Amino acid sequence: MNFWQEQRVIITGGAGFLGSFVVAGLKTRGCTNIFVPRSRDCNLLDRVAIIRLFEDTQPTMVLHLAAVVGGIGANREHPGKFFYENAIMGIELIEQARQFHLSKLLIAGTICAYPKFTPVPFQEKDLWNGYPEETNAPYGIAKKAILVQCQAYRQEYGLNAVYLLPVNLYGPRDNFDPQSSHVIPALIKKCVDARERGDKFIECWGTGNPTREFLYVEDAAEGILRAAEHYNKPDPVNLGSGREISVRDLVNLIAKLTGFTGEIRWDPTKPDGQPRRCLNVEKAQREFGFLARTPFEEGLRKTIQWYEENRP
């Protein structure tokens, strides 16, 4: 508690999905000096705006959670935007943290940085052993470049920058817009809407054969705060649950939990994305005592309940 009471913390993306849970966790831990820059007031692509943010808030720590993200469709439609905006936000923020002599900077990276055919479970040492899956490579490489910058700035300037590799997140307050959402919120919306319309079937992308790992958003927030408290090394750290599920089984589970009883049709002309995703999470447990606590089905039920209660 004393640690956080002494901190002045900027959280980029603090009004977003993950960031809102990190803010809540900070308040629970006794942090009172929390600054959440909003895009309308502080454009993180603008160096001058970042300088002004640092000068106005005088932070001791920055948690960089802001990102331009989306599912396979959004990544295919906006590869340039996803590369440029994620890279520039990170590059400018890290540079100003260095110039400001910031005490600590934590960057949330992405599992999309891993090579397409990484051995499962993914270990941090394999991060550079190949090219990312093509549909999200621009996003993944932009985030990877930020890791290199963090390590270079630590080596040359002594900046205490740490880097996490969170797996796909899900939970209440997620983005349910079908144009930009990730797989779980997209499937929840699809199944609930189909149930209410009385549709006899839904269509899903790909073959259903790839596997994915998911981390409940409150668990992810706890992992980030534990790393902020205890981790001070240059090497990236996976943040996940260590549990793998096929997309086909995921769709069947969400259909059951939402009460959709129609047929599930697969469109193999659409991309599957990375063949498998599952993280080795031993380092997070060893370095800062993080283990995911929320059972997957329980997390899905909470997410579905939130969507049913809060959708337009």
Image (cartoon, helix red, strand yellow):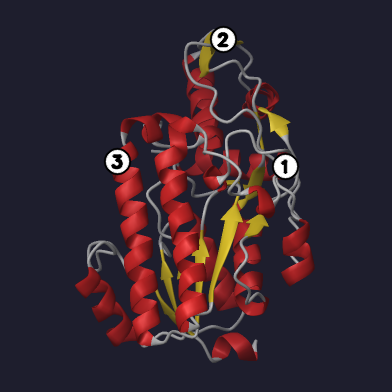
State how far apart marks 3 and 1 are (Cα): 34 Å
Towards the viewer: 122 or 108:
122
Q: Which residue is mark 1?
A: 296
Which residue lies under the disc numbered 2?
265
Local secondary structure at mark 2: strand
| Residue 103 on image: x %, y % | 49, 85
Q: Residue at x 54, y 10 (%)?
A: 201
Location of residue 43 in the rendering, given as x and y in whole percent from the top left corner: 24, 64
Q: Secondary structure at mark 3?
A: helix
* Quarter location, residue 74: top left
Q: Tell me the residue at 46%/31% (across/down).
A: 134
State the image coordinates of residue 227 (x, y, percent, origin top left): 64, 71
| Front residue (pair 311, 54) | 54
In this figure, which residue is indicated by the disc labeled 3? 80
The amino acid type found where label 3 is placed reads: Gly
Which label's residue is closer to the chain start, 2 or 1? 2
